Image (cartoon, helix red, strand yellow):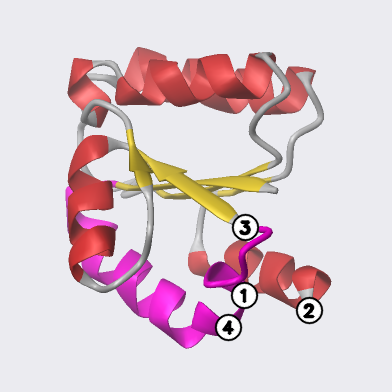
Amino acid sequence: MEIAIIAHDGKKAEMVQFLNEHQAIFHQKEITLISTGTTGKKVKKAGFEVLRMLSGPMGGDAQIAARVAEGKCSMVIFFRDPLEKHPHEPDVLMLMRLCDVHDVPLATNLASAELFMKALK
C-alpha cells in the first residue's frame, strides 16, 4: 500500500510526530511512503524510508496527484495549514480533486489521519 504524506511548513513537525506515534504501521514492509520533497527530508531524518518527490511548490503535489490518478497511491495524509497562503494552492486543489475523483482516502488534519490509522490496525 502506497501512502502519500504531505505537510505544509507549519505542520511538518506535527507530521513527524504523527508518524512516530504510528511507527508500527509505517514501518511495515507492506507500506510504502511517498512525500513531497521537504516533508520527505524531515521524515527521512526521523528514520522513515520515504520516496521523495519534488517540493510542493516545485511540482511535488502534482507528482503525487499523478500517482493517485494512475492508481498507485492508496491514501493521502496531507496536513494542510489553512491559515497560511500557499503559492501552489492550485496544485493542492488538483490533488484533493483527484482523490475525490479516484475515491482515494484523503486526511487533511490530525483527527482524520488518526481515524485512518485506526482503520489500518
11, 52: nearer the viewer: 52
Which mark is in front, 3 or 2? Answer: 3
Q: How much space separates mark 1 and mark 2, taking CA atoms?
A: 8 Å
Please tell me whether residue 118 is drawn above or below residue 88 in the rendered image. Answer: below
20 inside magenta stretch: yes
Q: Is residue 45 above or below residue 72?
A: below
Name which residue type carries label 1.
Ile
Mark 4–mark 1 CB contact (< 8 Å): yes
The answer to if 17 sits in the magenta stretch is yes
- N-term mark: 3 or 2: 3
Q: Quick check: marks 3 and 1 in contact, CB under 8 Å?
A: yes
Q: Is residue 28 above or below residue 106?
A: below
Q: Residue at x 40, y 81 (%)?
A: 20
User: Where residue 101 sits: x, y (%)?
Assistant: 76, 17
Q: Secondary structure at mark 2?
A: loop
Residue 118: mark in rendering: none
Question: Do the numbered discs 3 and 2 sit on residues whose CB atoms are within 8 Å?
Answer: no
Name the residue located 26 percent from the left edge and 19 percent from the top edge: 88
Q: Secondary structure at mark 4?
A: helix
Q: CA distance from mark 3 to mark 1?
A: 8 Å
Residue placed under numbered mark 4 in the picture: 24
Disc on the earlier residue, 3 or 1: 1
Q: Position of residue 73 (x, y in %)?
A: 64, 34
Residue 31: mark in rendering: 3
Residue at figure coordinates x 62%, y 75% from the top left: 25
Q: Secondary structure at mark 1?
A: helix
Q: Earlier in the sequence, mark 1 or mark 2?
A: 1
Q: Which residues are magenta?
A: 8-30
Q: Amino acid at mark 4?
A: Ala
Q: Amino acid at mark 2?
A: Lys
Q: Which residue is mark 1?
A: 25
